Image (cartoon, rainbow, N blue to C red):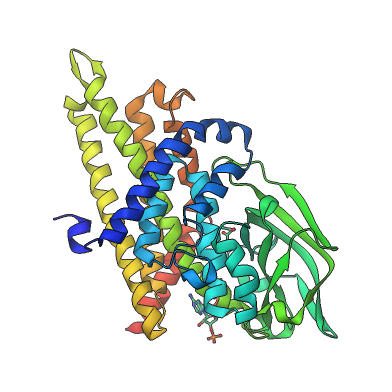
Amino acid sequence: MTATDLFPLTDEHKMIQQAARDFAQNEIAPIAAEFDESGDFPTETIRKMGEMGFMGIEVPEEYGGAGMDTLAYVLALEEICKADASHGTIMSVNNSLFCYGLLRFGSEEIKQKYLRAVASGEAVGAYSLTEPMSGSDAGTMRSRAWLDGDHYVLNGRKSWVSSGPAADFVVVFMMTEPEKKHKGITAFIVEAGEPGYILGKKEPKLGIRASATSEIMFEDYRVPVENRLGQEGEGFKIAMTVLDAGRIGIASQALGIAEAAYAASIEYAKEREAFGQKIGEFQGISFQLADMKTRIEAARLLIYNAAMAKERTKQTGERFTLEASMAKLFASETAMFVTHAAVQIHGGMGYSKELPIERYFRDAKITEIYEGTSEIQRLVISRLETSLR
Ligand code: CAA
């Protein structure tokens, strides 16, 4: 029995999975190495992904999305990430960190103005929580916003904004009442290029190099009250709720990377000969392949389970934090395990830029860091479990 027997896919699921697979293998895989090398943002393929409905999969059609469910999203994202994790990051930020937040917490006006453009792929969305001195401890941000008439004035330095240099619209979190700590954080939707919005340095990164990441500085940036997401002081809960969705996306990204590395390793083990036999005939290699496959399938089960949990909560409004964190923790560590083994199985060729194996290895690492490190996932899981007992 496989994961897809336990979580039967509808014709619609199979259709989007196939469409994403075809697009990824035909249009993204051939350019992935080049964009990894240059670090350029892949504007053209991202635009096409928007046209295909991949940039707002769970957003209802009335707001410019594809109107599908979370399982459809993870299936499509996994396929994109098998070809290139950088495209996957951009897709995941757009879908989970931007669109999901606006869908859950945005007013009708916000949905019409910003969600429609980003879900349809006409504009790129981003999410900005982290600051130079506030990463895992997200409640301690220093950026400030205060009300001035019918506008808020925003000041501060945000860092590690995925898609930052390319984003048209950003969900940004700022302190409005510092004495209230995490209950004093408020979320806003800001537009790039307006006065006081200053794009900072682009990060030179180990992996996912084509998904541009940057700092954004706010200097007396004025945002209308209507662009507040949720109520004043609700920002931290919004940030965490959105990250729960984001973590399912990153888990799917990790799964896609792991699957690509595993598939390449199987092929290599069947072809490459040493000491008079195929290397896959050595137990040293075949047992590694067995461990890789087992972890990949376990990760898939956790991811599909988290996707179904998120889907159920659309009716109940309950949280899916536990399922999302377990999926992200296990899938990201699986991606590291599998890509590390894949480099070793390929030997010198695994270390060479002639094959994508070393890129998979570099790309996998971020999945253990962003949208909550593995340590934060362990903290979230253990806190939830101990509070339940
Ligand atoms: N959903 C809804 N509410 C939540 C929540 C969730 N998942 N998690 C916490 N909350 C609520 C709590 O219920 C609590 O509410 P009350 O005050 O009403 O009781 C409140 O938020 C504070 O919760 P905690 O006391 O647990 O807060 P904490 O300060 O101890 O932090 C944390 C908890 C889990 C460590 C959290 O800070 C966290 O997840 N940190 C990691 C941040 C992160 O993932 N950053 C990545 C940013 S995005 C990125 O990577 C870049 C990119 O662009 C991709």
- Tally of marks: 0
The quadrant of the image that shows the C terminus is bottom left
- In-front residue for pair 226/338: 226
In the image, residue 300 sits, relative to residue 40, either above or below, namely below
Residue 172: % across, % down: 68, 68
The residue that appears at 59% across and 62% down in the rendered structure is 118
Residue, far top: 276
In the image, residue 337 sits, relative to residue 137, either above or below, namely above
Residue 326: % across, % down: 36, 64
The residue that appears at 65% across and 86% down in the rendered structure is 231
Q: Residue 371: in sight, yes or no?
A: no
Q: Describe residue 277's horizontal placement relative to residue 109 as left or right.
A: left
- In-front residue for pair 4/389: 4
- In-front residue for pair 24/287: 24
In the image, residue 359 sits, relative to residue 248, either above or below, namely above
Residue 201: % across, % down: 75, 48
Q: Residue 162: in sight, yes or no?
A: yes
Residue, far left: 1
Q: Describe residue 249's horizontal placement relative to residue 158 as left or right.
A: left
The quadrant of the image that shows the N terminus is bottom left
The residue that appears at 24% across and 15% down in the rendered structure is 274
Residue 36: % across, % down: 56, 35
Q: Quadrant of ligand 1?
A: bottom right
The residue that appears at 33% across and 48% down in the rendered structure is 18
